[in-house]
Image: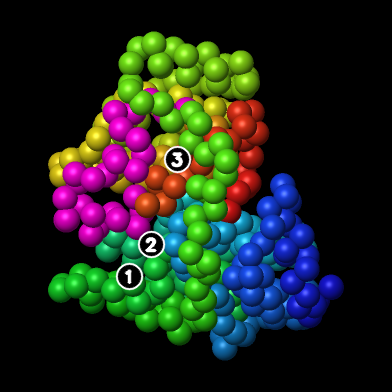
Amino acid sequence: MPGQSDPSAILCHFAQGQIQPDPAQRRVARQLAQLLAEVQVGTGRRTVDPGGRGIFLWGGVGRGKTRLVDAAVATLPAGMACRWHQLAFLDAFHRTFAGAARRDFGAAIDRLVGPARLLAFDEFHIHDVADAQILRRAFACLAGRGVRLLVTANPPPAGFAAEGEWQRHFAPLIEHLSAWCESIELDAGIDYRRTHSRIGRRWAVPDTAAVRRQMLLNLQEQASRVVALSFDELCRHPYCHGDYARMLETESALVLWGVPRFGERDGDALRRLVWLADVLWERQIALAVTAAEAAESLFLDIGEALRHMLGRDLARAESRLVALCSLPAGCSTAASAAP
């Protein structure tokens, strides 16, 4: 019902699968409900309300940000919200801008967002100048049309401030987000993906031929569509997020062989591992891993430069990969099934 701000519907969706929200999640659900009530005010065509603010929801990995956003979107009438993972959004933008939109920026954004009054934007981050410029222009365009924004990220907007010459490229986007969205922290200090009693049960050390065979056989007994690929095949070739999404479009389980202990020269492979982990989590693809080390030891030797650049992304990737190693095979969906 338009204007309703009862968070119970959000919490009901959030709690599916016997997951009980903690006090911090309940507090954020109330704030999300208020945003949804404002989004639903008025009927018919989207009305322009440049003064309306969105929410920038941030906090540590595994705190339930994505699950809360998905629960909020699920309570809205069809078509009122659209949800994008940032990397999928950028990939779709480039294809649309160069194709159906005929290099018309506004037309490309219209095709991606449609008539929605709320854009749910998951896993915001900026490492690339071109991406920052595209997002700044896209968000400004949507704000001018009265679209509200609901963002998830690990740090707050100010945490993305760049240093030196990069600052002038990133600052306009950060300033726009800070003005357009209320910054809300969600963090009860618990990574819920790691609290599962059977977490990481398919993360195997050491990486041997016998272990690989056993992992593959185990998953094949549980899932109908299993693919087995090595880390080098997936992460040492020039793939992007969109490539992984297309590559794993029909799979319900993946056996990932030969995950190494990483070093200072593995930046490109680590960035691809982050993208791969995001796609696997978005699709809820069950995972089995054979690795040189336990997950918590993989990134100890990457050096300060890589840790500074990828630290938050790697923490998210590690948390998601380990959680997917306990996900029941054959349960692949388009939405997250755990916080």
**Measuring 30% from the left and 32% from the top, which residue is drawn there?**
293
For the residue carrying disc 1, how many other residues have a C-alpha within 10 Å: few (<14), some (14-19), or many (20+)? some
Counting other residues with Cα less than 10 Å from the Cα at mark 2, is it few (<14), some (14-19), or many (20 or more)? some
* Position of 292 relative to 28 (above/below): above
* Identity, as a three-letter code, of the amino acid under mark 3: Leu
In the image, 242 versus 29, the foreground residue is 29
- In the rendered structure, which disc, 2 or 1, sits on the residue that comes first in sequence? 2
Q: Position of residue 55 (x, y in %)?
A: 55, 75
Q: Which mark is residue 160?
A: 1
In the picture, the disc for residue 72 is: none
Whole-Å distance between the Cαs marked 3 and 1?
24 Å
Residue type pointed to by label 2: His
Confirm whether the magenta stretch covers residue 88: no
Dots 2, 1 in contact, CB < 8 A: yes
Q: Is residue 315 above or below residue 106?
A: above
Magenta residues, as a range? 288-314
Q: Quadrant of residue 42?
A: bottom right
Label 3 or label 1, whichever lies nearer to me, is: 3
Location of residue 244 with respect to 218 vertically, above or below: below
Asked whether the residues under the numbered discs 3 and 1 touch, taking CB atoms below 8 Å apart as contact, a structural biologist would say: no
Name the front one of labels 2 and 3.
3
The percent coordinates of residue 311 (x first, y second) are 30, 56
